[in-house]
Image: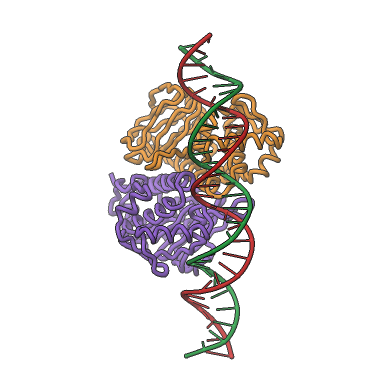
Chain colours: A purple, B orange, C red, D green
DNA sequence: CGAATAGTTGAGGACTATCAAAAGTGGTGG
DNA sequence: CCACCACTTTTGATAGTCCTCAACTATTCG
């Protein structure tokens, strides 16, 4: 159930057997959320951390004017996020993108774990730092890249993260976001996303089939989008 | 020297006297950086954390095409950031915005500290989480707010953070960013920033005098920009 | 005082948004 | 199994925000 999360943390820091064992023994409550269901709402009091077991989820925020911005997309094994254990109020909402299974872990259990297993705490902290790095990349993506590169970059990041998690590879993957959601993630409108994807397809950078994306030439897409995976900090396990 | 940092961490988590003492006893090397000097360059091997003692600094990234995006602005007392202690390679550059004094703290000292003082480690982790929250807000700012609100929001955030740190208040402050830097922080061009600031001034939302910003009516600016300080997580010290 | 940097302004163009409608897709119930 | 509904994708036309290029003015600092 929780192995995916353990695998992820092991990539973040070196853990011993006892650490992994403690992680696997975390008391949790399993829950299934249908696509679109909210897992956390901005302003909620936080009392638990949520771990994504299967399916996809995303975090988003709304401006005072009601515009929505998706700030991250999550795949199985991701914590959504550790904030829940240490901050009081949610600064963003979390929503299931597809049908998703999640494990909710009460704050006190997370805290007990990091108190008793400092290496686990360190791995989690590193995870938070890497999350931060991804947010920085998103700021740049949304702030400085034109639509084509911006959309391409998101597709690259998603492909690569799936690959690392052992859930796909960079030649293609199921991508169940609607164009409207893609728009909210890239800071564009859905109409413009539609046109941008069409261009990417025309140029042979991607192939779309329903919600399945094929990347015929990874390096070409990567270079077009200016995707440099340094910010994913894949080489962490010191 | 380091009191400001201690004060900040105390706002993040409850620390005991011994924790504060340990923080103050961190071995560090003091350094002065002139405006514009790089403190860290993207791709550098990281071996130390940097603490900002005085002056301002910012972090930025560059796209493959050479466009620059500033992803955060830092005031005295901020860590720049704790990444240095736990990640291997810098995913962004850090540059002095004004003449700045910094303390550099070797990775091993940070790690020794968090190992011996878990509460300090927790405070630092929370600090990382709050940083993450600010990045998320920036993603939204750059992705979904029009230029006027976007620039106003940045001014609000800066004002409020200065105030919290005891370095100013929301009625006005010295703001030593050039319009080009402001452009890189907001994802606009310097020409458009210039025009946007002029509009803000015309509408009486701000007054500019050299590099000093006056905010005649905080609530009006705050509401125009849609600034909601929830994301700064000011209520943390549980 | 002069050079360099930063701020301001104008004109024109590009990228992206808005509005609106048609076409496609998927799920539900009769 | 088809009709129907809701949602998503696609397309066209038009508008607007923001960018580019360029020149001019103001400020800063040695």
- Residue B27, by quadrant, is top left
Which percent across, then down, holds residue B234? 58, 41
Depth order, front residue of B70/D20: D20
Q: Quick check: A55 left or right of D25?
A: left
Q: Quick check: B19 left or right of B64?
A: right
Which percent across, then down, holds residue A135? 45, 47
Residue at 50% over, 69% down: A34
Q: Quick check: B210 left or right of A74?
A: right
Determine if residue B174 is in view. Answer: yes
Which percent across, then down, holds residue C28? 54, 81
Taking A45 as reference, is B152 above or below it? above
Depth order, front residue of A85/B36: B36
Residue at 45% over, 66% down: A100
Taking B185 as reference, is A190 above or below it? below
Q: How many marks?
A: 0
Residue at 43% over, 65% down: A176
Which percent across, then down, holds residue A70? 51, 55
Residue at 46% over, 32% down: B18
Taking A129 as reference, is B216 above or below it? above
């Amino acid at each position: 159930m929780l192995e995916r999360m353990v695998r992820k943390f092991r990539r973040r820091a070196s853990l011993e057997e006892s650490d992994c064992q403690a992680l696997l023994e975390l008391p949790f409550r399993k829950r299934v959320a249908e696509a679109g269901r909210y897992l956390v709402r901005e302003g909620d009091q936080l009392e638990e951390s949520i771990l994504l077991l299967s399916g996809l989820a995303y975090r988003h925020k709304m401006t005072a004017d009601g515009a929505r911005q998706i700030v991250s997309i999550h795949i199985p094994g991701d914590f959504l996020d550790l904030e829940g254990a240490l901050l009081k109020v949610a600064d963003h909402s979390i929503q299931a993108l597809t049908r998703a299974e999640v494990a909710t872990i009460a704050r006190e259990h997370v805290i007990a774990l990091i108190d008793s297993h400092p290496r686990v705490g360190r791995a989690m902290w590193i995870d938070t730092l890497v999350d931060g790095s991804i947010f920085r990349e998103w700021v740049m993506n949304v702030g400085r890249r034109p639509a084509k590169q911006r959309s391409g970059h998101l597709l690259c990041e998603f492909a690569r993260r799936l690959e690392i998690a052992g859930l796909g590879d960079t030649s293609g993957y199921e991508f169940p976001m609607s164009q409207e959601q893609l728009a909210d993630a890239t800071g564009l409108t859905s109409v413009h996303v539609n046109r941008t994807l069409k261009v990417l397809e025309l140029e042979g950078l991607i192939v779309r089939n329903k919600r399945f994306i094929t990347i015929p030439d990874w390096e070409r897409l990567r270079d077009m989008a200016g995707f440099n995976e340094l910010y994913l900090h894949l080489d962490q396990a010191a």
